[in-house]
Amino acid sequence: DSWEAQKNSFELIAQIHVHGGSASLLKALKVPLAFAGWYLLSIYYSIMNKQVLKVWNFPCTFSVTQLAVGSLWILLLWSPLPLPARKAPISLRSPPRLSRGDFGKLYSVAIWLALGHLMSTIAPAYGTVAFTNVVKTAEPIFTCIFAALFFGQTFSLPVYLTLVPVIAGVLLATASEVSFSTASLVSGLLSNVCFALRATTAKRVMGEPIGENLTAQNLYGVLTLQALGTLLPFALFVEGGQIVTGTITTVKAVGLFAFAKMLLLTGLSHYMYNECAFLALSSVHPVTHAVANTVKRIAVIVLSVLYFRDPLTLTGAAGSAVAIIGVLLYSLAKAQWAASQAGIKAQ
């Protein structure tokens, strides 16, 4: 998620309880810590997400549960906490101040976040983690389409040419997928559509200032709360009839404490890896961003295949590699195009 930030949580926490020297050290370690958190939490979430779906196959309700845990986390950060050394309570993160109209504007972004998250949870419920991650590499295709449709924005020829290996790689990986699932493919592609629309809508909505103290992390918190409110009625409608019986069966199989811990850790890792991703990627050059994102995707695919021992053909591996390289080339070409556009405007 590429939102502009005015502060970050590391600095806010540092201001609360550490001295200047410690704060400087924490600030210096911000980027490497953010990258480490992004990589580790992303891998952990991908594996844990699949683990839960294998014993509790209610993806709609599970997506709501993840958003609920994330919502509780952000509300805790916003809540004033009493500290012995301070007279007045202080929050770990200052909450935003938004009007009803501001919430309405942001909801047009939150609905696509909600649907994208829902589809991203459904995809691994019916397919492997590796396959769903390969399908997700197709998101730049929809980004380019919606940029042209809604903004009349076109990119340079090299940007569009890099989409060719992305498409070819996804098609090759899909055709040779041993555990192929139409539901997984369709939901993965729909998640790409939703996240591309979220990015496009956000660009339009965030073109002007909204509210007060709406930092990037606060924005993600507000969108998470709105997404929770959107998906909860839908999940109850779709899976409400079977959720009690299915949950009782799961609890009997894995134990109440173990099941509750799985849900809590999955929700926390989902929310926190998104925050770490922002902190990491907003602090580096777009080229570093592109390379880091590519390495992260490779790590998720390889480690998930090894962990779950998913069958992977040579053709499928080749298709995955081609698609991932295509996304890397797309990111590099787009960064170069953006730099050239900025140079033209500066003249």
Image (cartoon, rainbow, N blue to C red):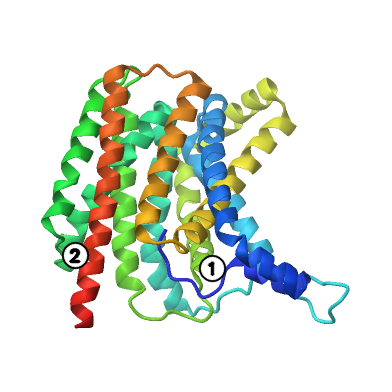
Q: Residue at x 14, y 62 (%)?
A: 154
* Quarter occupied by residue 203: bottom left
Query: Residue 345 versus residue 105: which sits nearer the camera?
Result: 345
Q: Which mark is residue 102?
A: none
265 is higher (above) or lower (below) than 93: above
Q: Residue at x 45, y 63 (%)?
A: 282
Q: Is residue 113 left or right of residue 258?
A: left
How far from the left and from the top, in percent, is residue 43?
Answer: 52, 38
How far from the left and from the top, in percent, is residue 103?
Answer: 45, 72
Q: Is residue 84 left or right of residue 182?
A: right
Q: Is label 1 in a helix, a strand or a loop?
A: helix
What quarter of the picture does the N terminus occupy? bottom left
Number of marks present in the image shown: 2
* Quarter occupied by residue 344: bottom left
277 is higher (above) or lower (below) than 204: above
Q: Is residue 49 left or right of residue 133?
A: right
How far from the left and from the top, in percent, is residue 84?
Answer: 88, 73
Please, what is the three-letter code of the amino acid marked with disc 1? Asn
Q: Is residue 126 visible?
A: yes
Q: CA distance from mark 1 to mark 2?
A: 26 Å
Please, what is the three-letter code of the amino acid marked with disc 2? Phe
Residue assigned mark 2:
150
Q: Residues within 10 Å of mark 2 (few under 14, many from 20)?
A: few
- Is tag 1's residue or tag 2's residue first in the polypeptide sequence? 2
Q: Residue at x 46, y 35 (%)?
A: 300
Q: Is label 2 in a helix, a strand or a loop?
A: helix
Q: Residues within 10 Å of mark 1 (few under 14, many from 20)?
A: many
Residue assigned mark 1:
218
Q: Is residue 92 visible?
A: no
